Amino acid sequence: LWAIATLKELGMDVDVVAVQALSNAAQRTAGKMNPQNLSNTLWAFAKLKKGIDMDEAGVLAVSTEFARRAGEMNPADISNALWAVSDLADKGVYVDVTGVRVVIKELPRVACEMQPQELTRTVWAIANLTAEGMDMPFADVQPVYEEAPRVASSMLSHDVSTTLWAMAKLKSMGVDVDVVAVRAVNDEVARVAGDMDPWGLSVSLWAMAKLDTYGVDVDVWAVRAVGAEVVHMASKMNARYVSHVVWATAKLSRHGGVHADLAALQAVGKEVSRLSSEMNAQDVTITVSGWSQLLELGHPVRSIYDSAALHSVTGRASEVVVLMSPFERRVTKRAFEIIDRAEKMLADGRLS
């Protein structure tokens, strides 16, 4: 299963019948698997689940074995297992909660040996399992955070973005996170920003804005480094990434005192007209909310968005308003009031 999942990751077609047969066999053989086999099998289940109907009883059987073998797992086994569990849970696949909790109890034992990617996967899993409602005792996960300063300088760009995102997500859910760990990872953003893809750039900005909103100081140079790369990568961004950049830029300007990167705003603003038809209700809300906040901070109107972008988002808002939550409707309505006022003042020559 691991080999087939790896090949699928590389873009190769896989034999669905073979996958289904192997997933059925997992239920029968789980009790004979060693720790690495267990974690690799569950990782494969998570990777193959999309688009392939597999025997979920096999998933349950493998995760049940964690309770018996967790004490033998090494850092890679544990990080892979927790990543897989959180990914499967997000897809609605039931796993044995008792087995997962036993694995979590092993984190203090293995954290000091984790490599950068293993720590990233673990923190990501902690954030997602917390979002799914699983209790994560701080005493169990704190040792993982404490290792972030040790491995941060060796993290690749994806590890930095993912870890920062996970820590920001935890903070936004009211969960304590180690501030020293956050800053250690945040300090690496400027180093790796040039290697980030559109996803990495958008979630890094989102994470820094979230952390700043909740009182965690962020590295100004990191924000600027990401903004500089957004200018070059905006044309490759999708609607969600563009809206996150606008929202994060506004939040960092309002709460963090970071001067808005007007070049980055103009770069993503040029893409809004192209992408507006792909925006969902949340994308529209956070985009116009970001624009309105930047207007309130006194930024010139056309440095934030152009008339074509505004027209396209206004049209899209009328299409998705029925899908907005009451909160999103209020925020969107208030944002458009501020934008409309600014547009009238611009037309009258009272605003630049």
Image (spheres, grey):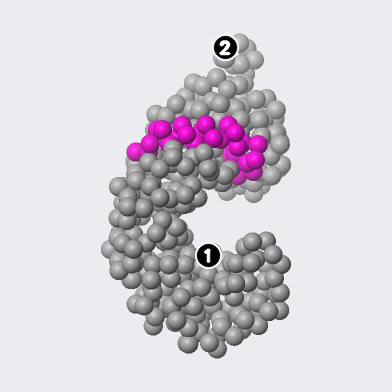
On the question of residue 318 being in view, the answer is no
- Residue 124, horizontal then vertical, whole percent: 45, 58
* Residue drawn at point x = 51 percent, y = 33 percent: 227
Q: Which residue is mark 2?
A: 350
Boundaries of the magenta span: 217-243
Amino acid carrying label 1: it is Asp
Quarter residue 308 falls in: top right
* Residue drawn at point x = 30 percent, y = 69 percent: 109
**In the image, residue 195 above or below residue 167:** above
* Residue drawn at point x = 69 percent, y = 64 percent: 12
**In the image, residue 206 above or below residue 4:** above
Circle 1 SS class: helix
Q: Which residue is mark 1?
A: 87
On the question of residue 16 being in view, the answer is yes
Q: Which mark is residue 156?
A: none
**In the image, residue 207 above or below residue 129:** above
- Residue 19, horizontal then vertical, whole percent: 65, 77
Circle 2 SS class: loop
* Residue drawn at point x = 69 percent, y = 44 percent: 278
Is residue 109 found left or right of 228 in the rendered image?
A: left
- Residue 344, horizontal then vertical, whole percent: 62, 18
Mark 1 and mark 2 lie on one chain; the one further toward the N terminus is 1
Q: Is residue 231 magenta?
A: yes
Foreground residue among 240 and 19: 19
Foreground residue among 58 and 313: 58
